[in-house]
Amino acid sequence: MPSVTTQAIVLRRADYRENDRMLTLLSPGMGRIEALCRGCKRVGSPLLSASEFFAMGEYVFYAGKGRMTVTSCNLTETFYPLRDDYERLKYATYILAVAEAAAQPGERAVELFTLLARSLGRLAYGQRDKGAVTAAFLLHFASISGYRPRLHHCVRCGREMADDEIYWFDGQNGGLLCAACHEALGYAQPITAAQVRWMRDVLSVGIDKTSLPDHDAPDPLLCGYVGQRLEKPVPVKGLF
Ligand SMILES: [Zn+2]
């Protein structure tokens, strides 16, 4: 019997028949997985918690007839506080949707899995501003997806940008724009020097180690930046 065991996080669930659910999961080794979770809605089912949003654990699948079925799960984390607090929940739902939009079947996703698990942990248990945690997720997500924003040089002329310059952010070209290039192009979003410092620091030491204030995180700008590059739209309604 072909059976597969892997760590995974539930990205999406959809009710199916009376007692079943279809799950979309993210596995570090296998990327996106679609699987049937049979009987999980029955009272007392050992798979009920494993078929909820954000559930993380070691899942065992039976792979047969072109379909994966969850046979058991050793649950390691439910990120339960996300369910209790609307503020935590809305940001967590958003980052889950971003991960879902990026994950591909059969494509390793070790970095994305680790980033998602840590970010959900910060949103569930941490005291940091939820928008700042989300901004940090998006920065690292952009990096592992191959479009880390350029924050030290102008994306158009390549000139090194000093710490105290007036900055513009050119999302299309993936980074900062100097004042002269902004004038020539006529587009780009304004961004403050504090926001640039915050992004540079978080990319270099991580959000847990930065001493810069959470309110300098440019979360709406990063949502737009990453959102433009995702294959399918992720709603940001109610986030800002
Ligand atoms: Zn320039």
Image (spheres, rainbow, N blue to C red):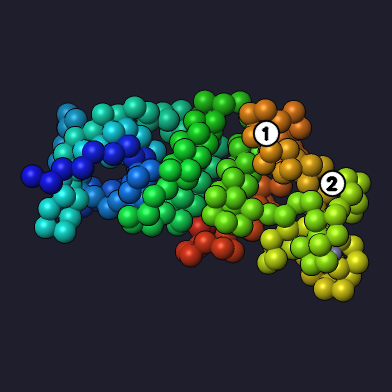
Left or right: 47 in relation to 123: left
To which residue does mark 2 refer? 193
Q: Residue visible at 49% across and 30% down?
A: 121
Q: Nearer the viewer, residue 133 or 240?
A: 133
Q: Residues within 10 Å of mark 1 (few under 14, many from 20)?
A: few
Q: CA distance from mark 1 to mark 2?
A: 18 Å
Q: Quadrant of residue 173?
A: bottom right
Quadrant into which the N terminus falls: top left
Q: Nearer the viewer, residue 88 or 133?
A: 133
How far from the left and from the top, in percent, is residue 129? Answer: 65, 33
How far from the left and from the top, in percent, is residue 169? Answer: 77, 59
Of the residues shown, which amino acid type is indicated by label 2?
Ala
Picture layout, residue 67 above or below residue 185 = above
Q: Residue visible at 28% across and 39% down?
A: 6
How far from the left and from the top, in percent, is residue 28? Answer: 38, 43
Left or right: 181 in relation to 116: right
To which residue does mark 1 refer? 205
Ligand 1 sits in quadrant = bottom right
Per the image, label 2 sits on a secondary structure element best described as: helix
Picture layout, residue 149 above or below residue 134 = below
Q: Residue visible at 49% across and 52% down?
A: 98
Q: Residue visible at 46% across and 28% down?
A: 81
Q: Residues within 10 Å of mark 2 (few under 14, many from 20)?
A: some
